Image (tube, rainbow, N blue to C red):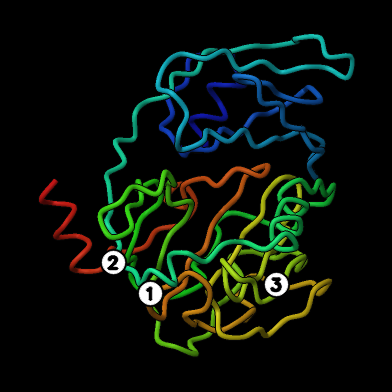
Amino acid sequence: MRLILLLAVMMGLRAEVRQGDVIRVAGPGESARMNGRTVRLYGQADGSRLGLMPVPAAEKPGDYALEVLDASGKVVRSGDVEVKDARFRRQNVLIAKQTAALAASEEETRLVRAFLQAETEGRYWADPLGLPLAGCMISPYGVQRFHNGIPTGNVHGGWDQRGGKGTAVRAAAAGVVRIAKMFELRGGTVGIDHGQGLETMYLHMSGFAVQEGAEVKEGEVVGYVGSTGRSTGPHLHWSILANGVAVNPAQWVKVKACAAQAAAGKKK
């Protein structure tokens, strides 16, 4: 699908995506713009240019113009993109009131915001990405979260994978560790900058195997499964972020849904 989208955008043809997808925009050009969001196109080893245009989970379905801009901001190429409804379902989580009430501290908010806004010229990542954990998926991307039957107003921005406490969590791709901290809301958190607009975050861990500033390779252990922060039991929540927007990991890696999760999906 990624290759089809890339070719369609390069040729100025109509492309179809779903909420939560990433459009790979190829140069020549310095940046790309769609629905008020602008992303950089970075130089690649082969001399081409590439940028990652995220389509948020909450993007309104419909037709949009995707424009490629030169250094002066002039449109040098454009194409039509149809965003389709991904039909994300609802999910109710039974959670203790004290746990549900946990909130991010000012420091947590500041550090995560800075991480999401980072721009790194070098590219560490390569396709395909790897799974950080072998466990099945408990909760998919994009579901509308309810706590004890009450809507939270939040959309699940990643995958929850099953894992026993202390199980090693591995980097989905090579990169630089920008965050390795125990937060109030997210619990034990590692944030890795993979360069050129791609980042991953790993939450609720019990401990760390890396320090901030360290360079890691794909598959390197970065921490251990836990149940810290706003969590109801040992598991890994992890997210893929394209230019600061949480996107659907299903476009990058594959994982099987846990048996109960798969059964619930068939009932919908």
**Residue type pointed to by label 2:** Leu
Point out residue 232 in the picture as x, y percentages from the top left corner: 38, 74
Mark 3–mark 1 Cα distance, whole angstroms, equals 30 Å
Which element carries disc 1, helix, strand or loop?
loop
Mark toward the viewer: 3 or 2: 2
Which element carries disc 2, helix, strand or loop?
loop
Which of the numbered marks, if any, corresponds to residue 261? none
**Residue type pointed to by label 1:** Thr
- Residue with the mark numbered 1: 232
Residue drawn 70% across the image and 72% down it: 217
Q: Quadrant of residue 221?
A: bottom right
Q: Nearer the viewer, residue 148 or 136?
A: 148
Q: Nearer the viewer, residue 207 or 250?
A: 207
Task: Give the vertical position of 244 relative to 76 (above or below).
Answer: below
Position of the C terminus by quadrant: top left
**Left or right: 147 as drawn, with respect to 23:** left
